[in-house]
Image (cartoon, helix red, strand yellow):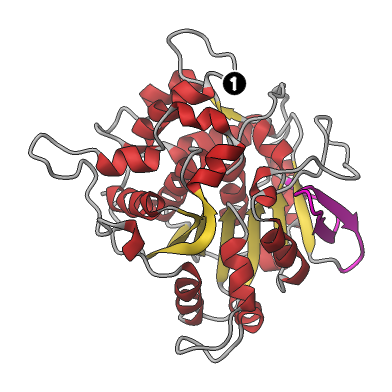
Amino acid sequence: MRYWMSPLTAAALAISPALTIALARAEAPAAARAAPHQPVRVILDTDMWGDIDDVLALAMLHALQDRGEARLLAVTGSTDDASSAAFIDALNGFYGRPAIPVGLVRGGVTAERTARRFPFLNAVTPYTEALTRAAKADGSPLFPRGLNDGRAAPDAVALLRRTLAAQPDGSVVIIQIGFATNLARLLESRGDAASPLDGVSLVRRKVRLLSVMAGGYADARGRPLAKSAPEYNLELDVPAARALFAAWPTPLVASGFEVGVSMRIDGRAVDRLYGHAAPHPVLMAYHHVDPAYRTIRRTAPGALHDHATFDLTSVLYAVRPDDGYFTLSAPGRISVAADGSSRFTAQPGGTHRYLKIDDSMRPRALEAMTLLASQPPAR
């Protein structure tokens, strides 16, 4: 999740799709590539609560699974709020997959702390709470779920360990689109009934890529930054973010703030895109947060606000790394400062990279994210 700061203007230029895909394949780390014709095994770690790019990202993953491109193994929440886990469970059920396990952080970043950091969110009740409370005329839930109380969700780290232990070696892609709390604690975990391996060893054996939305690495013109401004996903749990980037043992690709903010879902098209189902939880979430977001970004009367695609970019790269939507930086290392800012240092043999995109690539990437996030369930 990443909240709005300032808009960028994207110009649509033509480029050869074949050339773009060839360049991406040349740069994509070998660890990012799934076996041919095999769906990408995905764990999603999300701070779903106040911003709706998390909802759009999870909807994308379900669409990619419907298309045979991904297999969602588990979802863990990094916002310490029961409604977050309950809504994730309801969204999985809406897309026909109520059995996907959902975990929740304990003692992590609270919803109250998020609201203090971004007070404009206080203009509306969090959509996770509003939509889990929503009921039909007969009193039954509008969006059925197994987790009637999100606090019944298992601890996120325990679920991560169980899920990873059950997968083939080197097969899992983790997508982190929230706070680093759960994954940092995973690295610190010890052997248990799920696996005798400690957290670092378990990740090294089972995970081939971490695709993470966090930090900032370039300016509006794509020029590398010496140091970014503090970024939301990092600054609300800085110790966890620093631990994660310092110790993560597999290839890591970060999508910086500048990538998602340069591509926005067209608010004028949202009602049409999600008109295939009523009620639709993604559409309702978008409408629910609209009054808050239109206060910080000029929006034409009668239209929904245009929403940035921060978290969607990490999903798109994680599942389709070879499709030419992005290019990658040189190898290096990402470090996190005490204020929640990030810094990338290029170095041969480094295991960290960040996504790069230019004006010629944005229209195609935005179209893919928009259509995947609004694809009707294959139920």
Tally of numbered discs:
1
Q: x, y percentage for residue 368?
A: 54, 38
Q: Is residue 364 magenta?
A: no
Region in magenta: 327-349
Q: Is residue 336 magenta?
A: yes
Q: x, y percentage for residue 226?
A: 91, 45
Which residue is at a point 33% across and 53% down the rendered structure image?
A: 86
Which residue is at a point 42% across and 45% down the rendered structure image?
A: 59
- The N terminus, quarter of image: top right
Given residues 93 and 234, the one toward you in this image is: 234
Q: x, y percentage for residue 260?
A: 65, 37
Given residues 260 and 168, the one toward you in this image is: 260
Looking at the image, residue 47 lies above or below residue 307 = below
Tag 1: residue type? Answer: Ile
Which residue is at a point 72% across and 35% down the rendered structure image?
A: 16
Which image quarter: residue 189?
bottom right
Left or right of 344? Residue 102 is left
Looking at the image, residue 208 lies above or below residue 218 = below
Left or right of 351? Residue 193 is left
